[in-house]
Image (tube, helix red, strand yellow):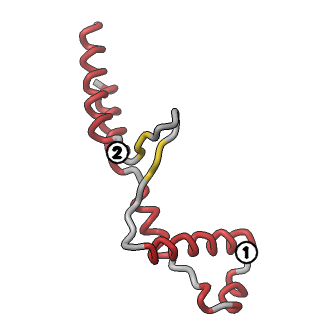
Amino acid sequence: METNETETLQKLQKLTAQYFTTLKPTNEANFYTAQFKVVNYLELGCLITDLLKLCILALDNDMHNFSKKDKSATINVSLILETVLHLFPMDEMEFLGYVGEVVGE
């Protein structure tokens, strides 16, 4: 029984090293960073301002008046969704699928 548990643990450790890639450990204990790619500072700035605008709209629930006030205040929803997609931890989801298979053995 102990040999089987050791083999299972080794499989899980191997899968963890291979698939847990979204979060990177920091120097601080119990903290991680998640990274996403941007083309340049302009794209980063657009992303940050669009996220802030989206939050304002969500709080005010007044989308039509917000865009009438300032035509440059339009939100690039495509950029926001693309960023969220890049942040989604697909490797970890694949890992969880493998864990389900290992545990089910």
Q: Position of residue 26 (x, y in %)?
A: 46, 41
Q: Position of residue 30 (x, y in %)?
A: 52, 34
Does 71 sit left or right of 92 as displayed?
right
Closer-to-camera residue (72/96): 72
Residue found at x 29% / y 35%: 17
**Residue at the top extreme, as displayed:** 1
Of marks 2 and 1, the one in the foreground = 2
Q: Measured along the vertical axis of the image, is residue 25 above or below residue 67?
A: above
Label 2 sits on residue: 21
User: Hey, what amino acid is under mark 1?
Assistant: Asn
Q: Nearer the viewer, residue 58 or 21?
A: 21
16 vs 53, left or right, is left
Disc 1 crowd rating (10 Å Cα; few below 14, some 14-19, many 20+) is: few
Where residue 33 appears, as percent x and y from the top left, is 46, 48
Q: Which image quarter: residue 38? A: bottom left
Q: Residues within 10 Å of mark 2 (few under 14, many from 20)?
A: few
Q: Quadrant of residue 21?
A: top left
> From mark 2 to mark 1, how far is it between C-alphas?
36 Å
Residue 43: percent from the left, percent from the top? 44, 75
Quadrant including the N terminus: top left
Q: Earlier in the sequence, mark 2 or mark 1?
A: 2
Tell me the residue that label 1 is attached to. 61
Q: Residue at x 69, y 72 (%)?
A: 56
The kind of secondary structure element at disc 2 is: loop
**SS label for mark 1:** loop
Residue at 24%, 10% (x, y): give it: 3
Q: Amino acid at mark 2?
A: Thr
The answer to whether residue 36 is above or below residue 58 is above
Residue at 51% x, 39% y: name it.
31
Q: Quadrant of residue 2?
A: top left
Q: Quick check: 100 left or right of 84?
A: left
Answer above or below: position of 58 versus 18: below
